[in-house]
Amino acid sequence: MRIGLAFARISVAAAALLAISPLSAAAAEHNVPNGIALSHYEGRVDAAREMNLTVVLKMHNSAEFDKVLDDLYDPASSRYHQ
């Protein structure tokens, strides 16, 4: 039930973002996760209703991120537990 509600919120949010996006439908098609692409527009939502969104950005420097993360747990590192 909770997953269904979360998916419904995401569906509405994605539809709203696509509706106001300056991107063409063809361009947006390649930037939307499969789960969202399968969703459908369910109409307008009351403006007073709270909406929670999660935004995921692609990580561009995963090697540096892994190094920093390793340093956080390495007692010999100056970054240990910082």
Image (cartoon, helix red, strand yellow):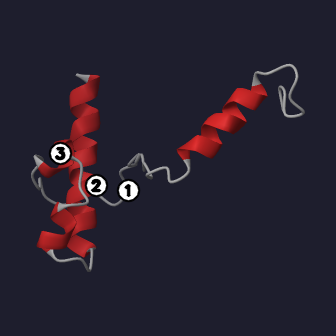
**Which numbered disc, 1 or 2, marks the residue closer to the eye?**
2
Residue at 77% of width from left, 28% of height from top?
72
- Of the image marks 1 and 2, the number of the one nearer the N terminus: 2
Decide: is 56 above or below 31. Answer: above
Q: Amino acid at mark 3?
A: Asn
> Are the residues flagged by discs 2 and 3 in contact, CB closer than 8 Å?
no
Residue at 27% across, 46% down: 10
Residue denoted by label 1: 48
Q: Within the image, what quadrant is residue 35 found in?
A: top left
Which of the 4 quarters of the picture holds residue 29? Answer: bottom left
Residue 37 location, x and y as percent? 14, 51
**Pointer 3: what residue?**
34
- Mark 3 or 1, nearer chain start: 3
Left or right, 26 with respect to 67, comes to left
Alpha-carbon span between mark 1 and mark 2 = 14 Å
Q: In front here: 16 or 35? A: 35
Look at the numbered disc 2 and give the secondary structure of its residue.
helix
How would you rate the neighbour count of disc 3 (Cα within 10 Å): few for under 14, some for 14-19, many for 20 or more? few
The residue that label 2 is drawn on is: 13
From the viewer's perspective, tell me whether residue 62 is left or right of residue 4. Answer: right
Q: Nearer the viewer, mark 3 or mark 1?
A: 3
Q: Nearer the viewer, residue 46 or 2?
A: 2
Question: Where 68 sits versus 12, above or below?
Answer: above
SS of the residue under disc 1: loop
Three-letter code, disc 1: Ala
- Badge 1: how crowded within 10 Å, few (<14), some, or many (20+)? few
